[in-house]
Amino acid sequence: MTVVDQARASTYDLARVRADFPILAREIHGRPLVYLDNAASTQKPRIVAETIAECYGGWYANVERGVHTLSQLATAQRERARETVARFLNARSAEEAVFTRGTTESVNLVAEAWGRRNVGPGDEVLITGLEHHSNLVPWQRLCEERGAQLRVAAIDDAGEVRLDEFERLLSPRTRIAAFAHVSNALGTVNPVREMAAMAHRAGALALVDGAQAVPHMLVDVRDLGCDFYAFSGHKVYGPSGIGVLWGRKEILDAMPPWQSGGGMVQTVRFEKTTYAPPPHRFEAGTPFIEGAAGLAAALDYLTAMGLPAVGAWESELLALATARLAEVPGLRIVGTARRKAAVLSFVMDGIHPHDLGTILDHDGIAIRAGHHCAQPVMERFGVPATARASFGLYNTPEEVEALAAALHKARELFG
Ligand code: PMP
């Protein structure tokens, strides 16, 4: 069976999935939308919008400390959403799930709250060569501030982290290793369980940036054995502006607060303030109440679809796209790791990725062009930017064919 046959023979209920996403019915420049920018942000199923509308129409109020009914309802909804997140990650308890604005804020929280207390002069932080800027710059700034050293495990020509180097760079000086589960620029799936174990053997903690993993695969933080896991709602079919930092309870318990203000305290006196236990200790200020509910709805939706089925479907799309794009003259795929998820980065001789993005947009095809907030990755591959098609649970083999056809057309026009 060819990959096309395999994709078509799949039992995955694509029509039902697509019907859940109203935006997919719209046209762009008079052509059906082909949305292949899922690694940047995913579209939202109806249930997420309905949940947010229900919040405003039925139970909205500020959370915590309210005695009136709506406030109690809103507080209960938020804590239920936290339980959904905990279940989704197979966390030990909901207290381990901190709501943040997204992956970026989650990493900054750890770098600043945990990092400032635990990383000092002469210490080291280990990252990899494929990190998104949001799992790089916070560590760089921490190291600069604390007189520590940032170490980087290089990636090879396929875009895989060199595990021998990762292990070699770990030492008793390493306080934390921070690495992506899936690379947003290359699609590489890192062996994060193995990497977390290596970090622990060296006495370091392990933080996993899961922004690009949670939409595509089951994540079990206990099985992975990491200490922190971060992800964003908007990449997993939920609202933007909400995300999660999961942290091992005993580590969160020992961490000082990050931002300060209402909601994160126990008692406040001019002489001394005491802080709430996690997760509230790390959630200062009025949170994104409706966002947490929307995120829970998205996670429930994805769970009901079955992440293994979603991941399998996306793998078929990726295999088909890889085969089709390889047929386009002058096209080079950037990132050829053995294990990849849903991301296809490429460059084409004689056509800048940005121009490619514009050309494809005229055919209704949304891809991303740029450095994907991973400039060191671009440098590693000697390109200023790539074009990137990334797949979600609603994409189709026909859309992959449309992408390939548009690239052939661009080749003819500009080649
Ligand atoms: N890490 C990775 C691997 C990402 O792909 C992204 C988003 N492109 C982020 C972190 C940052 O996520 P956010 O912008 O939602 O905070």
Image (tube, rainbow, N blue to C red):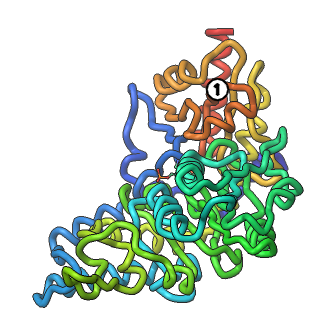
Q: Amino acid at mark 1?
A: Ala
When asked about the image quadrant of residue 148, the answer is bottom right
Q: Please state the horizontal and vertical placement of residue 326, each as a whole percent of the image.
A: 78, 31
Disc 1 target residue: 405
Numbered disc 1: secondary structure:
helix
Relative side of 317 to 143, left or right: right
Q: Is residue 378 above or below residue 243?
A: above
Residue 368 picture quarter: top right
What residue sits 71% from the left and 54% below the top?
A: 315
Ligand 1 closer than 8 Å to label 1 CB: no
Q: Is residue 327 visible?
A: yes
Q: Which one is in front, 289 or 170? A: 170
Rendered position, 165 above or below 40: below
- What is the residue that sits farthest to the left in this orientation? 68
What residue appears at the point 22 percent right and 71 percent down from the top-left corner? Answer: 54
Q: Residues within 10 Å of mark 1 (few under 14, many from 20)?
A: some
Q: Residue furthest right?
A: 164
Q: Residue at x 60, y 44 (%)?
A: 390
Q: What percent of the width, then of the height, locates residue 153?
A: 77, 50
Q: Nearer the viewer, residue 384 or 82?
A: 384
- Drawn side of residue 55 relative to residue 160, left or right: left
Q: Nearer the viewer, residue 319 or 82?
A: 82
Task: Locate the C terminus and report the quarter of the image it occupies.
Answer: top right
Residue at 44% x, 83% y: name it.
83
Q: Give percent across and percent down for residue 252.
A: 51, 80
Q: Is residue 84 above or below residue 168?
A: below
* Residue 6 place in picture, x, y as percent: 76, 53
Please give the count of numbered marks on the rendered protein: 1
From this viewpoint, is residue 16 visible?
no
